[in-house]
Amino acid sequence: MSIDLNTSKGIVPNHIQESWKRCYSNGLDPTTINQDHILGEYELTEYYDKYEELLYYSSSILKDVHASIRGTEFLLLIATPEGYIIDTVGEPSFIRHADNVALRKGANWLEESKGTNAIGTAIVEKNSVLVHGSQHFWENNHFLTCAAAPILDSKGQLLGILNLSSYQQNYHPLTLGLVKRTAHSIEQALLLAHTQKQTKNFTKDLDFIYNHHPAPLITVNKEGTITRLNTAATRTIGYSEQAAIGKPISNILVEVNPLVPEQKFLLNNQVFTPHILTSDYRDQSYMLLRGETKQQNAALTNRYHFTDIISQDSKMNEMIAIAKKAAIIDINLLISGETGTGKELFAQSIHGASFRSNQPFIAINCSAIPESLLESELFGYEKGAFTGAKNQGQAGKFEAANGGTLFLDEIGDMPLTAQASLLRVLQERCITRIGGTTPRPIDVRIIAATHKDLQQEVEAGRFRADLYFRLNGFTLKLPPLRNRTDLLLLAEHILSQLPFKKENIELTEDAQTFITEYEWAGNFRQLQNVLQQAAFLANESRITKSLLLSLCPSPVKPIEKERTKSQKIMSLREHEIALIQQVLEQTNGNISRAAKQLDIGRNTLYRKMKEYGLML
């Protein structure tokens, strides 16, 4: 047995050794494992139903974790005790690579199927585990680093597995701790849900769970006075705990009657449902108001508004002003800008300021969905349209967004066949499901976004000119982070919104200089990720240049803040070619290191190199 262990000083952990022994005793071969047990649509639905509670209470927590580490190459997932993956969230660039080894919904990752891996080994060990690189039994999985932790009920029974996977070179010593804390948060949310059914002594025993529950919770007495609320509730109602406690609930939820538990109340897109808790010996009854995000035809409504856009940059402020004007004119919009510049933030803000704001906002990433599935995702399908189709058929994104806004992210990566279908829908303003014959009228505003130059794509024959003009009612061009003049303002904002408490974080002078001079290839996402890590690791709450340097790829050639008139301004294509050439030289042609330094996936880098004739 040969295992390369970079995380334990050359010592192979016992759980890895024991797992490999089990794999060999089961007759597995590290080079020829080919047991992809993939659930069909019907079987997967059965697992969704079986683990509905686990999926429900883990969903918002996974979204919070995803938001805090967005921009990194990772996949966060939930697996059942039987080893089947039932929920995933992560970055499209890594998801596509993970799909090559069946690290996706419906796949089984027990040791019997995949050999030593974090999911399967955590199920056997019933403990948190890290499986890194060549510790994986199957050689095809050696590119992964994975951390998994069990999700247990109050009796210690296994409910599921939380797993975080990334490329081997992205290993971070804090990953396992993050996974364990997240799994614990899910356990606490489930425990609170169960305890609500057992009302005795609720207020005495669940202080910790109450405060850490992801949903807004407000407790009132029989007089309708607020006696308690958690952090999520303070964010929803806009009052601090000190300001709210002792106040009548009617000050916040005007129509609430604490004596009528069947009522539901809406506030800031949260539906509050009252639940009677208990009465004490003084005949003092209590009611819990629990908030849930309002659902609109299973649609995602917008979470961001123009007030969420932080800017003191003249170019960005100009784009915000134009976007506000465009929001109230019901035309299709095209938003262009590099990855991480805030294209979806603008799209959601435009939707929120439009007359469609009370209708669904649906987003779809055209580059993250396989070509064979994209049209069914957009337009839906009828019963029996293809193998694996749901018996009742499936509505597509256009139908889900009817009356509202459909955000087509990375529209430049849409295949030509799907472009033709999309053009027909925009012209006829109706859709026909795959396998169907009946047109369905739709009323949808399209906001498309791309990091590509669509005019160049049109000239190259990769994008339809007629579709480009249909989408381009008006174009918003978002500036990259390196060209903005308010980097320090953004940095201070990020530090003020840390997902963990950290008092008096200070950026030293040399750190401030580094932030303004560094070329942030990943734009806001990279800046956010680096500052969050730096704040966590900072000694004495001081973030220094050396700490930032340790968390950033080697700086590429600094961007000149001023260009003389004699200098030639490169096009986006020329700049991208020069940047890729420079990074390839710095990494001696190492594709993995170059892709990481550019903050893109390896497949994307290969594609760009081929497109620009830069193949090694």
Image: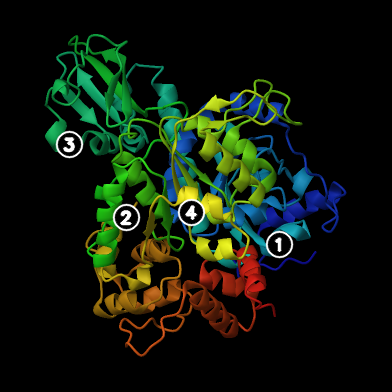
Q: Secondary structure at mark 1?
A: loop
Cβ–Cβ below 8 Å for labels 3 and 2? no
Q: Residues within 10 Å of mark 3 (few under 14, many from 20)?
A: few
Q: Label 4 to label 2, Cα distance in Å?
A: 17 Å
Horizontal arrangement in the rendering, residue 384 relative to residue 499 (left or right): right
Which residue type does callout 3 highlight?
Tyr
Instruction: Determine which of the numbered discs, if any, sits on residue 402 in the image.
Output: none
Nearer to us: label 3 or label 1: 3
Would you place residue 266 above or below residue 184 in this image?
above
- As displayed, is residue 561 above or below residue 135? below
Q: Which mark is residue 498?
A: 2
Please name the colour scheme applied to the rendered image.
rainbow
Indicate which disc residue 142 carries: 1
Q: Quadrant of the C terminus?
A: bottom right
Q: Position of residue 392 (x, y in %)?
A: 65, 20
Question: Is residue 52 shown left or right of residue 251?
Answer: right
> In front: 288, or 311?
311
Q: CA distance from mark 1 to mark 2?
A: 33 Å
Residues under numbered marks 3 and 1 in contact, where contact means CB atoms less than 8 Å apart: no
Residue 141 placement, left or right of 584: right
N-terminal-most mark, 3 or 1:
1
Mark before the other along the chain sequence, 4 or 3: 4
Q: Quadrant of the N terminus?
A: bottom right
Q: Earlier in the sequence, mark 4 or mark 2?
A: 4
Residue position for label 3: 239
Residue 177, numbered circle: 4
Q: Amino acid at mark 2?
A: Leu
Q: Amino acid at mark 1?
A: His
